[in-house]
Amino acid sequence: MAKEIERKFLVCGDFMPYVTCEHRIRQGYLNTDPDRTVRIRVLDNQGFITVKTRNTGCSRNEWEYEIPLHDAEDMLEACRGRIDKIRKIVPAGNGLRWEVDVFGGRHEGLVIAEIELPSEDTPFDRPGWLGAEVSGDPRYYNSSLASD
């Protein structure tokens, strides 16, 4: 079992000069129960299924497995809500990285930065383009955005 420790922030400034690569993400949810979400994701040309448990602070259990792309595409069709986003990668120092999600579709204009940490007390620099922290705010969970 893997543990995901993640902090989320709204983006309020220009992070683009720091981007090193980007990926297109399409994802949907087969189950949005906060105790056990089941996500289907197509990342560029790869398919994944992910199960996550309820957050405890910034941490939760997470299991992610690659699945055949055609299966992921079919499963996305079975999802009630979906989101599209471009994930831009920004180095954060000390082996960490920011994943900055630029949402499209009905969430056009929403930009959220996430950083995954090895432990909840791992220090990290907050670049000037970060805005308010939204870790733990269910309005900004991808599963909530998919079902809006």
Image (cartoon, grey):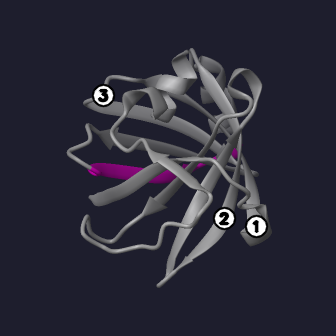
Q: Amino acid at mark 1?
A: Cys
> What residue is drawn where x is 63% and y is 54%?
100
Q: Are marks 3 and 2 in contact (CB under 8 Å)?
A: no
Residue 37 at what x, y percent from top left? 37, 32
Query: Is any atom of residue 107 visible in this view?
Result: yes
| Quadrant where the C terminus is found in the figure | top right
Reading the image, the residue beneath label 3 is: 34
Circle 1 crowding by C-alpha within 10 Å: few under 14, some 14–19, many from 20: few
Reading the image, the residue beneath label 2 is: 89
SS class, disc 2: strand
Q: Amino acid at mark 2?
A: Ile
In the rendered structure, which disc, 3 or 1, sits on the residue that comes first in sequence? 1
In the rendered structure, which disc, 3 or 2, sits on the residue that comes first in sequence? 3
Where on the picture, by quarter, is residue 139? top left
Query: What residue span does the magenta drawing correspond to?
Result: 58-69
| Horizontal side of residue 33 vs 44, given as left or right | left
Q: Depth check: give the residue in front, 114 or 40.
A: 114
Reading the image, the residue beneath label 1 is: 21
